[in-house]
Amino acid sequence: MKTLKKQWLEVLSTYQFVLCFLFLGPFFSLVGFFLLFTSLWYFSVLYLVWLFLDWDTPQQGGRCNQWLRNCTVWKHLSDYFPIKLVKTVELPPDRNYVLLSHPHGIMSFGTFCNFSTEGTGCSQLFPGLRFSLAVLNCLLYMPGHREYFLSCGICSVNRQSLDYVLSQPQLGRAVVIVVGGANEALHAVPGEHCLTLRNRKGFVRLALRHGASLVPAYSFGENDVFRVKAFAPDSWQRLFQVTIKRLLTFSPCIFWGHGLFSAKSWGLMPLARPITTVVGRPIPVPQCPQPTKEQVDHYHTLYMKALEQLFEEHKESCGLPASTHLTFI
C-alpha cells in the first residue's frame, strides 16, 4: 500500500509534467514578450542572445543533464500510472538503432518516461545504449519548453538532427521516434489501436542510410489515460483539427481526465491506467547511402509485420482481449 505522501508525490509529479507539456512554452513566450516593455527588458534580450548562441543544440542531439534524467520526480511519475518497460531481447551496444514508439497518445507518457528519463530504469535494462527521443522542431525553440526537453536529451525529429546523432563515431546510439505524430493523436481514443504508419517511410530511409537496426516498441495503455472527443472523419470539426495540424504541426485534440483533488470531476489530471511499453526484436538493416524505393518498401513491410507480431504476442498479457487487433492508416 502506498502512503499518503507517496500518493501525493506521484500526483504532483504527474501534474507538473502535464502543465509543462501544455503551458510552459506559451507562458514563458508571453512573459518574455511583455518584459520587453518593462524595466526588466534586459532579461528578454539576454535570453534572445542565449537562444542565438545555442540555436544549433536541438540539431546536435540535445544536451543530456544526467541529474535531471535521474531526478526522483520521474520515478514518481512512472509509479502513478504505473509505467513499465519490458525488454524481450538484448540490444547490443555495438551498433545503432532506430526505435519506433507507438502509439502517440495525447502526451506520450510511456515514450517520454521510458526513454528520456530513468523513471523505469532504462539504462539498467539496456546497458551501453544512449537513447535520444526526437520531437517536433517547434517545441525546441519555445522558451521554457526548450530548456525542459533539451535537458532530458531530447532532440529535433528533422533529418539533420537524426543524421547527426547516428553519425557519431561511438556506437550504441538509439534515436526514438514517435512515428504517428500529431495525426495519430487524433485517434488516441481509449480502447482503440489505430496507427498512422502505412505511408510513413522516412524512418526506414534513415535506418538504411546509417545501417541502423529498426526496433518496434508498443506502449499498451497509452491511449487509455485520457478521455478523448473523437469526431467523424467527414465532420467539420475533424476538418478543423486537420487544418490546424497542417498549419501549426500539432493537433488540437479535445481531451480530459479528472480533477487534481477529485476523481469524480473533470480536469487535466490523467487517469491512473497501467502503461506497458514492450520493446521488440531488432530488424537488421544494411547501410545504403542512397536507398532505393524497393529497399524502403521492403523494410517498411518487414517493420509493419514485426510490429503487428509484437502486438499480437503481448496484447493479452497487457489486459487486451484476443479479438483486439492493430489498425494501420
Image (spheres, rainbow, N blue to C red):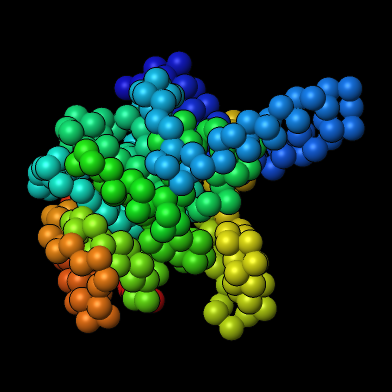
- The answer to whether 144 is drawn above or below residue 96 in the figure is above
Where is residue 237 shown, x and y percent of the image? 66, 73
Left or right position of 234 against 165: right
Left or right position of 18 against 9: right
**Residue at 20% across, 55% down:** 212
- The answer to whether 192 is drawn above or below residue 257 in the figure is below
**Residue at 20% across, 67% down:** 288
Q: In which quarter of the view is residue 191 placed? A: bottom left
Where is residue 185 shown, x and y percent of the image? 49, 61
Where is residue 60 shown, x and y percent of the image? 42, 42
Left or right position of 92 against 110: left
Residue 123 seen: yes
**Residue at 51% across, 42% down:** 56
- The answer to whether 323 is drawn above or below residue 106 in the figure is below
- The answer to whether 60 is drawn above or below residue 63 in the figure is below
Where is residue 91 shown, x and y percent of the image? 13, 45
Residue 265 seen: no
Nearer to us in this view, 188 or 139: 139
- In the rendered view of the protein, which quadrant contains the C terminus? bottom left
Number of marks drawn: 0
Nearer to us in this view, 51 or 85: 51
**Residue at 35% across, 53% down:** 163
- In the rendered view of the protein, which quadrant contains the N terminus? top left
Q: In which quarter of the view is residue 215 placed? A: bottom left
Nearer to us in this view, 134 or 112: 134
